[in-house]
Amino acid sequence: MADGQGLSLHVPEPEVRPGDTPDFSKVVIPKAGSVERPPIDVDPRDMRDLAYSIIRVLNRDGEAVGPWAGSLNDEELMEGLRHMMTLRAFDARMLMAQRQGKTSFYMQHMGEEAVSCAFRKALEPGDMNFPTYRQAGLLIAGGYPMVEMMNQIYSNEADPLKGRQLPIMYSSKEHGFFSISGNLGTQFIQAVGWAMASAIKNDTKIAAGWIGDGSTAESDFHAALVFASTYRAPVVLNIVNNQWAISTFQGIARGGSGTFAARGHGFGIPALRVDGNDYLAVHAVAKWAAERARRNLGPTLVEYVTYRVGAHSTSDDPSAYRPKTESDSWPLGDPVIRLKNHLIRRGAWTDDRHKQMEAEILDTVIAAQKEAEQHGTLHSGGKPSTRDMFEGVYETMPPHLRRQRQKAGV
Ligand SMILES: Cc1ncc(C[n+]2csc(CCOP(=O)(O)OP(=O)(O)O)c2C)c(N)n1
Ligand SMILES: [Mg+2]
């Protein structure tokens, strides 16, 4: 034993705890427009710095600057703003519905709306996402009917999944949204496997895998990177670093690596970090990575630097483990306000039009909610039939299930 000292483990601790003053001074935020945009066919060894910086397009004055700017026109940006505002309004209504006992569970996206909404616009029809529970923006920006999402949340008679899935665990093959599984990390290996299958079939469709900062600690994350790297699978591998994994801060899963993106280096996978609260930056990076996959140049690892403003889920109380005002101190701001300010700066938007759109969106969400509630909520109205529980899993129902169904009399 050296110096007579016993061994000890290093256990990372967050900078602050409840009651302390939030402090993000150690989060280095590069200037918007300062990070280079490498050519699509770059050698991963020539872009290692991009795993340690943050690609940003929107500056503090609301201007779009630098080599990653310009991937969207004003119309597209206004549409993006509407998608993010819709997701936010949808979240607020569904959170309230959970508190009213109309559903058992809900998970919100507050602060992370740009990530899934902007990413969706970089994909083509037929591409497949393997999402977690915090990417409902993929559905909203992809035009999936909101009322179907609500039917699923209420597990009512019109629930497309017939009450078999936890609320918010949507599934839509047509909208490129693979069934959500609560088993985190599985999304990465499945995305890589799907992408490999697409290449084996000489198809043109690409896959996108999704994982949170905390879930990168799972073995599945690393296994997925091995396969993606070896076979150069046409896949975009997305890490949403929202600083928290329920009550565990991101420093635990990140461990000794400088950033989550830097994990890509050990696998020879191009890795980038992007401002997850900057709709324009997310879209530009997603486009870059999707084009690499589509041109058969292989996988890309993208870390979205963002902040989970709300509770982990309706079963969580963050005031137990982080200062209440921490989200106000997050240095990358609010994705909705930043895009709104950019559009105002460009002369394409005004405060009045913003307020008007907010009201219109709320009306649309309330109308969808009324329609969904006519089909029932958790404890009232129409429910999926008990018989449905036995259907849709096996092509031919095995004898033991047939017996159980007969016994249930359905
Ligand atoms: C394999 C697995 N382990 C543990 C859990 C329980 N669990 C649910 S959410 C969560 C935190 C995940 O955090 P992160 O990956 O950062 O995603 P975020 O919720 O922040 O989007 C955990 C541990 C799970 N669902 N699956
Ligand atoms: Mg997280």
Image (cartoon, grey):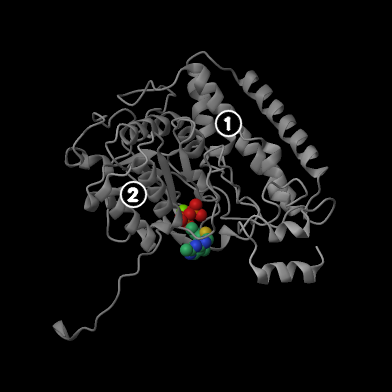
Choose top left, top right, bottom left or bottom right for residue 255.
Answer: bottom left
Residue at numbered disc 2 = 26
Residue 265 vs residue 95, the one in the foreground: 265
**Quick check: can you spot residue 303?**
no
Position above or below: 406 against 324: below
Q: Residue furthest left?
A: 2
* Image coords of residue 208 (percent x, y): 42, 42
* Image position of 248 with respect to 124: above or below: below
Q: Earlier in the sequence, mark 2 or mark 1?
A: 2
> Residue at coordinates 40% horizontally, 43% vertically from top-left?
304
Cβ of mark 2 under 8 Å from ligand 2: the answer is no
The amino acid sitting under disc 2 is Lys
Name the amino acid, label 1: His
| Horizontal side, residue 77 vs residue 222: left or right | right
Observer-side mark, 2 or 1, equals 1
Question: Would residue 142 be seen by someone viewing this image from the given angle?
Answer: yes
Residue carrying label 1: 83
Q: Quadrant of the C terminus?
A: bottom right
Q: What is the count of numbered marks?
A: 2
The image position of residue 248, as x and y in percent, is 46, 62
Asked if residue 138 lies left or right of residue 250, the reply is right
Regarding mark 2 in the picture, which secondary structure is present there? loop
For label 1, the SS is helix
Quadrant of the frame with the N terminus: bottom left
- Closer to the camera in the image, 388 or 176: 388
Q: Is residue 43 left or right of residue 400?
A: left
Q: Position of residue 404 (x, y in %)?
A: 73, 70
Q: How dense is the environment of label 2, judged by Cα within 10 Å: few (below 14), some, or many (20 and up)? A: few
Q: Residue at x 37, y 34 (%)?
A: 290
Q: Quadrant of residue 69?
A: top left
How far is the residue under mark 2 from the one under mark 1? 32 Å
Q: Position of residue 329 (x, y in %)?
A: 47, 45
